[in-house]
Image (tube, rainbow, N blue to C red):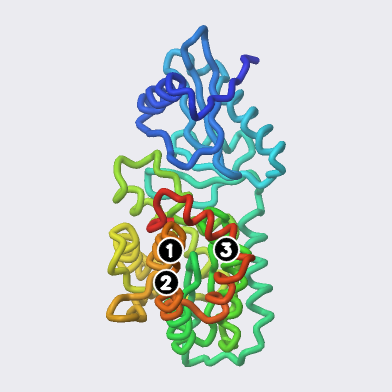
Amino acid sequence: MPDVAKIFPSDRHALAQVDTLLAAEGIRRDPNLDYICGIYEDDQLIATGSAFGNTLRCFAVDHGHQGEGLLNTIITHLMDIQQERGNYDIFLYTKIKTARFFHDLGFYEIARVDDALIFMENQRDGFTHCLDRFQREAAAISAPADPAKPVGAIVMNANPFTRGHQYLISQAASQTSLLHLFLLSEDASLFPFAIRQEFVRAGIAALPNVVLHASGPYIISQATFPSYFQKDDDAVSRSHACLDIAIFQRIAQALGITCRYVGEEPFSHVTSLYNQIMQDELPRTGIDCHVLPRLESAGQAISASTVRQLLKDGMEKSAIDWPQLAQLLPPAELDWLQSPTAGPVLRRLAAADEVRHH
């Protein structure tokens, strides 16, 4: 078996070879990678693969060496790396034409996007177990069901949780008999999941018909969705939305969800495009998509990205505008941000190059 070498982010020559190998397969290097490896013949890279968190990404084998088992060697190496990390539930994105290969290695299809990509995992019943958890969490809600109202859903990141999020949830809750709130649980955000979950839970405490779910690995954020199959950001957004819909349709069937709520998006082109695709495609699956107006402060829609920018600017100036933030955040979260406990999050915000799209 040929040796597999780790490729370091500082090795520009090796990364250039990775890019060339990927380009020959019609893909590009994903910006979300935390491990890259390759197989060399002399000094020439002939096979490569990568990982991010518990996902596998960006595979390519030189056309002159296909059929030699190199991809199998790369996958075996990456699975060993995942085991060293303590990850046993592994996910990958691949092209339709290579799905059979990964199935033979023990991966199972979760969902696909047309002829573009397939989302797979190495657990036969992983998604089923996740749906079972969602059902158990919903069964624990004691609020009486109103048959005149639908069962709805919201998916949010809440990075951080704002008065705008709270308003969106309360509006959707008033229109539904039961509202499933899926909070993105991957820690790809500047505010860690545990913190976001704590403040979302506090923010919905007075809403008895809202059930909070940690999304698990099946509802995928824009921050970690793979971009290497697509030629531009709009194509990435379309593929992400279509994969989201394919997965969400199965979740909706399991939970009896018939409508999904999103907030208006006046700032982000990516999110606006995503919402538009939702409005166009969800009804075709029998699920209504409702766009709710955003809560405003001083004539502007309240946005988590605005909060992050205010915090970053304030940290850089050593003068955070707490009165302005008080108009955007629930009191408990504002108090937490002013406490020593929030120090690591604030320092992470200050160190980030860009906070608008995290």
How far, Cα to Cα, is label 3 from label 2?
Answer: 33 Å
Residue type, mark 2 in image: Asp
For label 3, the residue is 215
Foreground of the two, 43 or 220: 43
Relative image position of residue 190 (x, y in whole percent): 51, 57
Residue type, mark 1 in image: Gly
Q: Residues within 10 Å of mark 1 (few under 14, many from 20)?
A: some
Pointers 1 and 3 in contact (CB under 8 A)? no
Q: Is residue 245 left or right of residue 6?
A: left
Q: Quadrant of residue 137?
A: bottom right
Q: Quadrant of residue 326?
A: bottom left
Furthest toward the front, the residue is 318
For label 1, the residue is 314
Furthest toward the top, the residue is 42
Q: Is residue 258 visible?
A: no
For label 2, the residue is 321
How far, Cα to Cα, is label 2 from label 1?
Answer: 7 Å
Pointers 2 and 1 in contact (CB under 8 A)? yes
Earlier-in-chain disc, 1 versus 3: 3
Earlier-in-chain disc, 3 versus 2: 3
Q: Residue at x 57, y 86 (%)?
A: 209
How far, Cα to Cα, is label 1 from label 3?
Answer: 32 Å
Q: Is 322 placed above or below 281 here? A: below
Q: Residue at x 61, y 23 (%)?
A: 73
SS at badge 1:
helix
Labelled disc at residue 65? none
Q: Residue at x 38, y 48 (%)?
A: 114
